[in-house]
Amino acid sequence: MSMVDPILFYFDFTSPYSYLASEKIDALAEQYGRKVQWRPILLGGVFKALGTVSLVKQPGQADYSVKDFARSARFLGLPYAQPAEFPVSTVAPARAWYWLHGQDCALARRFAHEVFRAYFVDGLNIADAAVVLELAQKVGADGTALEQGMSDPAIKDRLRAETDAAVAAGVFGAPWIVVDGEPFWGADRLPQIERWLETGGY
């Protein structure tokens, strides 16, 4: 794999660690002249395919995980408030992202940040399509066109296909970041990713 290949960033909008990584990954990549290819997936689909469950549904890990979400955010200097409803379906924002990405990559990236912050800072219900449309309009999207686009069978199929492809590629959680073919799981792997980018691998 060429050292100029994009960094792959698989994420789910309901994943706290995905939110934390999303705030850092682009700037980190830019330091080393790299681009990041964002790929939203549905963790629920991943877990179903693998027969696993999220951290907060694993016996003995739920309370620790919630504490760690907030502590990790503090460590990275990022705002964080545990959502009242957690986790939630991210079908609506993920479909919206893929439609927006097909129109304007930069707009889709702004939208992703808006969704993450709306959920993990402001506590909005991003499972609600109406909320998603409002967030998209806030960053300059055409709400009417997006509403139609989110219902497009091709967009629905795209999200399913991306999730299936992620599972086939070995993804079992989020964020899942791939640098030069090397996978890293979790926002806490950002220092390792930086070392990898700095040295060309280790």
Image: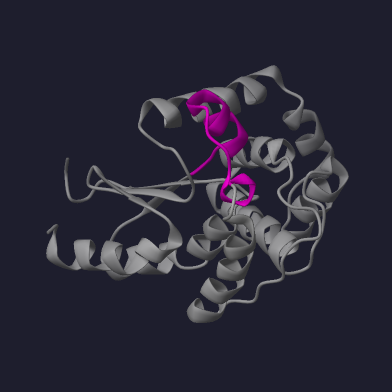
Say whether residue 28 is left or right of residue 3.
right
Q: Position of residue 202 (x, y in %)?
A: 12, 59
Give the camera-side residue of 197 and 104: 197
Q: Is residue 44 magenta?
A: yes
Q: Is residue 101 visible?
A: yes
Q: Position of residue 34 (x, y in %)?
A: 30, 58
Give the camera-side residue of 99 and 74: 74
Which residue is at 67% across, 35% downward?
A: 95
- The figure's colour scheme reads one colour
Residue sticking out furthest to the front? 60
Q: Position of residue 75 (x, y in %)?
A: 49, 80
Q: Is residue 42 visible?
A: no
Which residues fall within the magenta stretch?
A: 39-58
Say whether residue 162 is left or right of residue 32.
right
Give the camera-side residue of 13 and 49: 49
Say whether residue 45 is left or right of residue 185.
right
Q: Answer with the quarter of the image where residue 195 lies.
A: bottom left
Q: Is residue 191 magenta?
A: no
Check the image and report above or below for 129 versus 83.
Answer: above
Q: Position of residue 104 (x, y in %)?
A: 58, 45
Check the image and report above or below for 147 versus 190.
Answer: above
Give the quarter of the figure containing the N terminus. top left
Which residue is at 48% across, 27% downward?
A: 50
